[in-house]
Amino acid sequence: MALQYWAYIFLSPGFDAEQHVTTMDSGSCRFKAIGISMNNKEQVIEIAKQLVSEGVQLIELCGGFGPQWMTKVSAAIKGVIPIGGVFYGPEARKPMLDILSKDIS
């Protein structure tokens, strides 16, 4: 079966999973992106379950979740679809942490 519907769940300061959702559709493949507040990582479990019920074929998590959350999400959905992650290489970690540690207020 060809990829027809997939999702990406990411963490970002001040984002709300109810408000910060976008869907794109090419006619042959649909993509959904959902933003979650960095303080509410645990929401990813229920969001993943909902996505599975919608027919999503795979979910990618942003690197901020890390491998432990990939495992938790996969277990919560009983491994019915692949759960992957986007990660930065060692050369990008310090610059990324510098950005994330800056106060945006």
Image: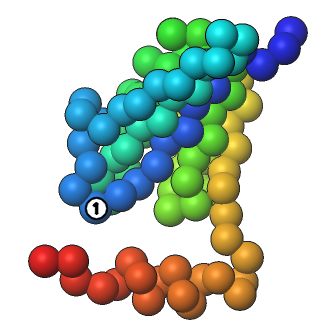
At horizontal 48% and vertical 36% (from top left) the residue drawn is 33
Residue 50 falls in image quadrant: top left
Q: How many marks?
A: 1
Looking at this view, is 95 or 29 the one in front?
A: 29
Position in image of residue 91 (x %, y %): 71, 87
The furthest residue to the left: 105
Find disc 1 in the rendering and name its residue: 13
At horizontal 59% and vertical 10% (from top left) the residue drawn is 55
User: In what quadrant of the picture does the N terminus appear?
Assistant: top right
The furthest residue to the right: 1
Amino acid type, label 1: Pro
At horizontal 24% and vertical 42% (from top left) the residue drawn is 16
Residue 38 falls in image quadrant: bottom left
Position in image of residue 98 (x %, y %): 44, 89
Position in image of residue 3 (x %, y %): 78, 19
Q: Is 59 located above or below residue 62 in the figure?
A: above
Position in image of residue 70 (x %, y %): 61, 47
Q: Is 36 located above or below residue 65 in the figure?
A: above
Residue 7 falls in image quadrant: top right
Q: Secondary structure at mark 1?
A: loop
Looking at this view, is 28 or 52 the one in front?
A: 28
At horizontal 64% and vertical 18% (from top left) the residue drawn is 26
